[in-house]
Image: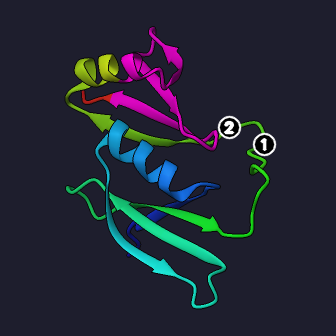
Amino acid sequence: MLKFNHFNFNVLDLDKSIAFYESTLGLKVIRESNAADGSFRIVFLGDGSSDFSLELTCLTDRTEPYDLGEQEYHLAFVTDAYDSLHEKHREMGVICYENEKMGLYFLEDPDGYWIEIIPAK
């Protein structure tokens, strides 16, 4: 039997990314790992209700933005507070795409990754 564990985004500014995920989605740091040689930092964020986590990896010598291709992939969250979360994200200016017909929208994080917000059915 397999069970989802985590998903990784490589980021340029770990502190900026942590602040984004904390302020927009309420994710919290659940564990951290640092390379002995200082070459990378890894932080795992959790939602406090599931075992799934978001891994943010920062390669300390990386200065160029990551090539995200055509951004045909994304991370999705479901919420029972869709309307209030949508208003919060609109006020924050982090909504990058909205599909009103489908009733969902996307945020763009500091590195250009898209996060889908879906209302609970």
Say whether residue 6 is left or right of residue 25. right
Q: Is residue 35 above or below residue 103?
A: below
- Residue 79 in the magenta stretch? The answer is no
Spot occupied by residue 98 in the image (x, y as percentages of width and height): 50, 16
Q: Dot 1, crowdedness within 10 Å: few (<14), some or many (≥20)?
A: few
From the image, tell me which residue sits under label 1: 69
Residue shown at 59% from the left, 54% from the top: 13
Place residue 31 in its image quadrant: bottom left
**Mark 1, secondary structure of its residue:** loop
The kind of residue tagged 1 is Gly
Say whether residue 49 is left or right of residue 112. left
Spot occupied by residue 81 in the image (x, y as percentages of width and height): 20, 27
Place residue 44 in its image quadrant: bottom left
Spot occupied by residue 107 in the image (x, y as percentages of width and height): 49, 30
Q: Is residue 20 above or below residue 7?
A: above
Spot occupied by residue 103 in the image (x, y as percentages of width and height): 39, 16
Instruction: Tell me which segment is drawn in magenta.
Output: 89-118
Say whether residue 109 is left or right of residue 10. left
Front disc: 2 or 1: 1
Q: Dot 2, crowdedness within 10 Å: few (<14), some or many (≥20)?
A: few
The kind of residue tagged 2 is Glu
**Mark 2, secondary structure of its residue:** loop
From the image, tell me which residue sits under label 2: 72
Which quarter of the rendered picture does the C terminus lie within? top left
Residue shown at 37% from the left, 60% from the top: 45
Using the image, tell me which numbered label, if any, was put on residue 100: none
Q: Is residue 33 above or below residue 80?
A: below
Place residue 1 in its image quadrant: bottom left
Residue shown at 25% from the left, 58% from the top: 50
State if disc 1 and disc 2 touch (CB < 8 Å). yes
